[in-house]
Amino acid sequence: MTVPVPYRVTEREAETADTATIVLEPVQVALQPFAPGQFAMVYAFGVGDIPLSVCAIDGHRLTHTVRAVGAVSGALHALRPGKTVGVRGPFGTGWELPAAAGLDLLVVAGGIGLAPLRPVVRQALAAPERYGRLNVLIGAREPRDLLYTEEVRGWPAALTTVDRPDSQWQGEVGVVTTLLDRATFDPPSTAAFICGPEPMIRATAGELAHHGVDPERIRVSLERNMHCATGHCGHCQLGPLLLCRDGPVVSWTRARPLLMVREL
Amino acid sequence: MTVVRHGFLGALSPAHREQLVGFAKEVSFPGGIRIFEEDGVADRFWIIRSGLVALDVHVPGRRSAVVETLGEGELLGWSWLFEPYRWHLGAQTRVAAQAYEFDAERVRAARAEDPAFGLAVTHCVAQVIARRLKATRTRLLDLYGPPA
Amino acid sequence: MADGAVVIDKAGLDALIAVLTGRGRTVVGPTVRDGAIVLAKISGGDELPYGWGVELEAGTYRLRAREDGAAFAHSAGPQSWKTFLHPPRERQWSADRGADGELTVTEDRTPPPSYAFLGVRPCDLRAIAIQDRVLTGGRHVDPAYRGRRERAFLVAVECTEPGATCFCVSMGTGPAVGPGYDLALTEVLDAEGHRFLVRSGSAEGESVLAELPRRPADETTRTAARERVAEAAERMGRSMPLVDLQVLMRETLTAERWDDVAARCLTCGNCTMVCPTCFCTSVEDVTDLSGDHAERWRHWESCFDRDFSHLQAGPVRDSSHSRYRQWATHKLGTWFDQFGSSGCVGCGRCIVWCPVGIDITEEAHALNRERGGADGEGTP
């Protein structure tokens, strides 16, 4: 797989003012199946491609949540059902939820970081007997920035906090790390899955490790500049890691020493 | 089992925790009740047992601006520890809340009488303040905001 | 002898070029152009840089006439073979949007050229092996690179004349040739004449050799060749500290030395362009005027470019400090983690072509001293 494979946009749902979820289906040939945490390179015709994690796993359908922040993401955000994009993938490491069998689960998401974590929550909810307690902690800037609100309402153990409440907001206000106090889990037998802005990842993972969660069981999804996704372009290096290949999901054991070096 | 990792009481030694709880009485607040107001006399403080309390600032023309919410196990109020013993935020329950309420004057007196106890309590409060300062600084970064 | 080594003379070298050309190959070799020994298409032995050597120093490259008329007694020039195997600019695929909006993506299937590289230095032979690992050794293979690489015929030349900026001995890549060649030459000039000891390393090498005017290798030539290479090993102009460089890089990420080098570095990226292993690229997407035909082009990129590490809010590596550190630690350290070897082959190009003469060996020594390693350890 070296060139993008045509996929058609079959559904599109606006999540927030600048974020939409698009469902893609293969026009003819389908890519290999994606695992939660992995990403696709999605190509907007003539503009370019960007990495987008899968936020739902459903046969050959690929679901991506895209926030319009640049030329490519803006073009993908603007797509409507019927349009065609090019897709390469699957790339990178996954969350590997099954390895957390028998453990309490802590899913911590900041902003659009919820997108790659949604399949983890769905997987865990679909097999409650396999895991301990599930906690989903979600942080966002404002209530209107929250993703998948309807679905999240149906998640039994989800707590949401925002930085900037509006007058209607009746929930928590504060950083997502403060929600750790409200979560119910036993640190020595907990697996954590974290995605969000890097300072939020550092704060959350650092706090969990401090309170006895095994750093090997803290999995974080990192972001660097990905161009080729095949390990050939060099842009996504983080010290010894090529994040398109060795990431985006890595253990806190690996990530911590790298994230603490400025400008690495 | 809820693991209280940062709960205010959890940070004290068992002896000091018992000493402090000796000053406590159980109270409950309905939802939407104002517990204290900015610049009011900080003569009490609480450890929340359940429910959710919002800290807010009065901004003319805006309904109260909530800066943070506090829940189970968290300390509500630290202005009682430092002069001039006046609240610098307001507090209102989001939903019905239960709490241990402490008479600030009695705790301050105990602090003066028993420096070890005083130090432990001050240390705990300082930890809470440090943690909230850290959280506030993180929020100042507006990490989820649109790229500059 | 059993190894099948033979001796050819200058006419044999001419014949080699003719045979390779006759087999449909584009022969690329060193030739004098624009005051440098460059790598370019050559059609005859007379285009080789007979009688030319080079004077190298940090930030300095000068051609120098040689009395002895040697063809390969010059060190690395401004280019390396990656120019041909991993070209600076390349179309990867094109996409067309049909009237119904359907997308068709077509991989670029330009038939890869069939190169013969004449005069591949041992350090550069290793560099090719390193790029092979990066571009074809992982889960994903760069098909265009593989196509060119599989068709390339490599004529290595052992190094008998290291430059003042060379340190292949430190990196274990030369001056004797390692594996991976089709033919390996050692140039010998003495009272018995100007000749080349040739060994073959592949079946095709063997068959090419069979077409050349040659004689079996005599002991005098073998000994002379061996001695010249052994002497070259003693004349390295530079050396790395005798420590585990991967560990050194890992342990000095916060060293003050990076500030020192950052004060000199112009972040021009010359070192990355001349480095025979630097492989980084960026892509750009272009459309024609109709708007229905788009192409994906890939071009060399440098980690010294500020946008190289760009994220939504800006570059991860903003300071020149961090960008030089990225380059050096990748080359000497994290390359091991990523691709199982060093990314440096000791060719010295980055030292020569740095406009301010930054010397990666000097920086490594300084980092080693700052870490507390013995001062001068491994210095020549």
Image: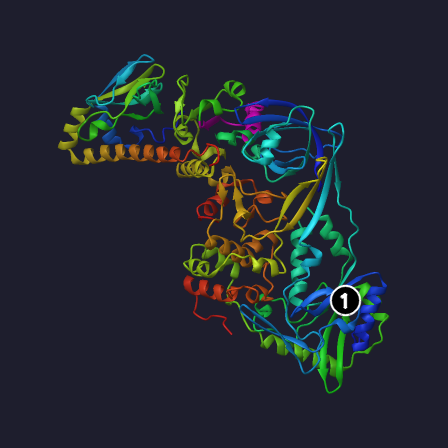
Q: Can residue C163 be seen in this snapshot?
A: yes
Q: Residue at x 46, y 32 (%)?
A: B144
Front in this rendered view, residue C305 or C120: C305
What amino acid is labelled 1 in the image? Ile
Tell me how many marks there are. 1
Q: Can residue C178 be seen in this snapshot?
A: no
Residue A163 is left or right of residue B122, and the answer is right
A140 falls in the magenta region: yes
Q: Position of residue C293 (x, y in %)?
A: 73, 38
Q: Is residue B96 above or below residue C364?
A: above
Q: Is residue C131 above or below residue C50?
A: above
Q: Is residue B17 above or below residue C199?
A: above
Q: Position of residue A196 (x, y in %)?
A: 49, 34
The span picked out in magenta is: A117-141
Say which chain tag 1 marks.
C
Front in this rendered view, residue C145 or C126: C145
The residue labelled by disc 1 is C42
What secondary structure is marked by label 1?
loop
Q: Position of residue B70 (x, y in %)?
A: 34, 24
A85 falls in the magenta region: no
In the rendered view of the protein, which quadrant contains the N terminus of chain A? Answer: top right
